[in-house]
Structure formats: structure tokens, C-alpha cells
Image (tube, helix red, strand yellow):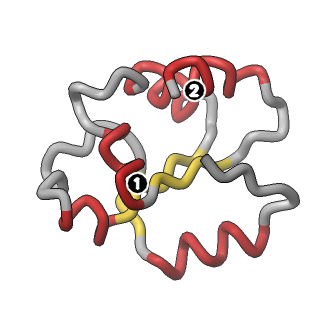
Amino acid sequence: MVNFCATCPNWDSLWRIILLNGGVKLSVADSPVLASLRQLAEAGVSILVCGTCLDFFGLLEQKNVGETTNMLDVVTSLALADKVIQI
């Protein structure tokens, strides 16, 4: 995941990353990819982090990058995307 996130800035068409389920753990302070996600956010990539998932893992207050979001935003993002990469 570290290498994947470090490679993401090389994609010109990347506009949004959605963190769901256990993936929300990537948005917290001790995440090995936090710096990469922050770099992407600063470059204009939208980082959406599932609020229900954060709550489930008890991480709601520990999120350090991205926008806490809901299923409507997730489904809308998937519907609008030209391509979806699922990891």
C-alpha cells in the first residue's frame, strides 16, 4: 500500500480516493501512507473517508487527512468515475 500511494501522484487523471472499511485506518496519524495521502490532498485530489467506518473502528476523532463522508458521496463518486481501481 505504501508503494501504491507513493505512485498515485504520477497519475494525471486521479481526482478522488475513497477509503472504506479497514481502509479508513490509512487516514490516521500512525498510517504509513499518511504523508502520501496529504501530498495528494494538497495537489487537489479529493480524499473521502467513510464516517460510518471510522466510527466502527473508533477512529472518528483520529482522522488526519481527507473529508469524512457518507454512502451517498461514495456511490455518487463511483457513478461519476471513468475508471475505478479497487484495492
Residue sitting at the far right: 82
Q: Position of residue 36 (x, y in %)?
A: 50, 22
Q: Position of residue 43 (x, y in %)?
A: 62, 28
Quickly name the residue at label 2: 5
**C-alpha separation, residue under disc 2 versus residue under disc 1:** 17 Å
- Say which residue appears at 16% left-offset and 44% top-offset: 62
SS type, badge 2 = helix
SS type, badge 1 = strand
Q: Position of residue 29 (x, y in %)?
A: 22, 29
Q: Are marks 2 and 1 in contact (CB under 8 Å)?
A: no
**Left/right of residue 35 with respect to residue 77 in the rendered view:** left
Q: Residues within 10 Å of mark 1 (few under 14, many from 20)?
A: some
Is 54 situated above or below 8? Answer: below
**Left/right of residue 67 with respect to residue 16 in the rendered view:** left
User: In the drawing, what numbered circle is on residue 9?
Assistant: none
Q: Amino acid at mark 1?
A: Glu
**Left/right of residue 13 with respect to residue 9 in the rendered view:** right
- Say which residue appears at 42% left-offset and 74% top-offset: 70
Is 26 situated above or below 16? Answer: above
Mark in front: 2 vs 1: 2
- Say which residue appears at 79% left-offset and 29% top-offset: 11
Q: Residues within 10 Å of mark 2 (few under 14, many from 20)?
A: some
- Say which residue appears at 75% left-offset and 75% top-offset: 79
**Left/right of residue 13 with respect to residue 56 in the rendered view:** right
Is 48 situated above or below 45? Answer: below
Quickly name the residue at label 1: 67
